Image: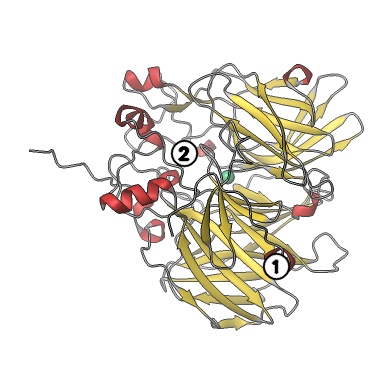
Amino acid sequence: MVAEVERAVSPYLSGNYAPIREETQAEDLRVIGELPVEMDGMYVRTGPNPQFDPMGQYHWFDGDGMLHGVRVRDGKASYRNRYVVTKGYLEEKAAGENLFYGIMEMEKNFATGRGYKNQGNTALVWHDGQLLTLMEGAEPHSVGLPGLTTNGTYDFCGKLISSFTAHPKVDEKTGEMMFFGYNPMAAPYVQYSLVSKDGELQFTRPIDVPRGVMMHDFSITQNYTIFMDLPLTFSVERAMKGGPVLAFERDLPARYGILPRHGGNEDIKWFEMAAHYMFHTSNAFEDGDDIVLHGCRLASTNVLQPAEMPKNRNGDVDGGDPDESQGLMHRWRFNMKTGTYKEEQLDDVGTDFPRVDDKLVGYGSRYSYNARFNKVPYGEQPSFEGINKYDLKTGRMEAHLFGKERFGGEPVFVARNGGTDEDDGWLVTFVYDEIEGTSEMIVVDAKNITAAPLARVMIPQRVPYGFHGAWVTNDRLESQTQHQMAWQPPV
Ligand SMILES: [Fe+2]
């Protein structure tokens, strides 16, 4: 008799983290307030949404990708949601059940021979005429708009030889896209690639780091690329001894490696400092001999610890300190001449998911818009109660709060066409009302962030909390181009 598969119990399967299973479409949504008539494009957000009840230990990072899209035009909005149709999604659909283990038991997938599922559930990037939905362990999936159809996996005409970060950086002035891929288990642990504005993958070069680490993001300036070798480490050996496959190692250093954009490992300058973690950078720029980086620094992280792991500083396994597990906005100045650095904490309010005007990535931005953490009891899942707008020139911070028992996510900046000021535009994000049980897309005036939303677009179904989004302008929607897919889902 086959043993009953143990089904996951996880806070990421309940409340508004719970998946929805309907794929739907709705026109002419109810809007409270008014959508700016100049807003013309589509907000797309990806996130985890397991098709079947997961087995084993479930983490938020594990669910099948689901895309939620709101098309805005002429003051009206429509909505649709679709799964990212991946190989793993189709395998499980055919089997009628969950077949893959999640990140906290990823070593079990090697035993089953399935590998890790590429869910396309983490973030989105627009480049070379197509929207890609990403997860950091495998290749991108290309998405057709506005239908949110999965075109297939995209491997740059066979040239992709690494995994693909969820956070590539596009220099909108040159059109180049920089990305990296990391391998948690074997050297080269990190590989760095550059794609030309025409979509040609120009090079892939190994970057030396001494062990497998979870490298979630990086950053660019006009001439440099910045890697983060931070001590959230992978170890199958540790997992074999009953520890977590992924753990924060407080005794290892945090290292930032800066190399010329078109350079290689031999050109890197490393800056070493005390252990910490950072999921997301905000932006970077060059200032004389300095490279200036802003981002949400965590003193430690427990985010990937199974609920039952010890969470203290005493054992072999450091689960991170509960008081240290939220990002805090920081600035670093790395001096490329002297090899010294300065680190400065800019706020003591926890934030993450920082976004800036996409046009300014690599060139510095005065404003950073960050999701603002709600203070949650330790061990509970994170939630975001608002948006913090940082003026990095004056040091001023202003907040937009979603309201009582209302939580949201990453704010995406939408520039107003023809706007001259950096903050001339809007912020969009999905907000869930825990009391009403309803979801909406809010539109906030980025210049006047403390005011009530200009528009609340009511979504006809619940939108689970998710990860990153993108605003695709109407020009881009109309300029989508066909690419050669490495794999296409059957029609
Ligand atoms: Fe991310």
Report the quarter where the N terminus lies.
top left
Q: Looking at the image, can residue 345 be seen?
A: no
Q: Amino acid at mark 1?
A: Glu
Scheme by which the image is coloured = secondary structure
Q: Amino acid at mark 2?
A: Val
Q: Pointer 2: what residue? A: 303
Q: Which secondary structure lies at badge 1?
A: helix
Residue that appears at 59% across and 64% down: 145
Packing grade of label 1 (10 A; few <14, some 14-19, many >=20) is few
x then y, percent, for residue 4: 15, 42
Please determine whether, in this image, residue 204 is positioned above or below residue 15.
above
Q: Determine which of the numbered discs, if any, sits on residue 411 in the image.
A: none
Farthest right residue? 288
Please determine whether, in this image, residue 144 is positioned above or below residue 133.
below
Please determine whether, in this image, residue 300 is positioned above or below residue 99.
above
Mark 1 Cβ inside 8 Å of ligand 1: no
x then y, percent, for residue 422: 83, 59
Q: Pointer 1: what residue? A: 478
Q: Earlier in the sequence, mark 2 or mark 1?
A: 2
x then y, percent, for residue 317: 41, 23
Please determine whether, in this image, residue 71 is positioned above or below residue 481.
below
Residue 13 vs residue 236, the one in the foreground: 236
**33 on left or right of 101:** right
Q: Looking at the image, can residue 41 be seen?
A: yes
Residue that appears at 36% across and 63% down: 21
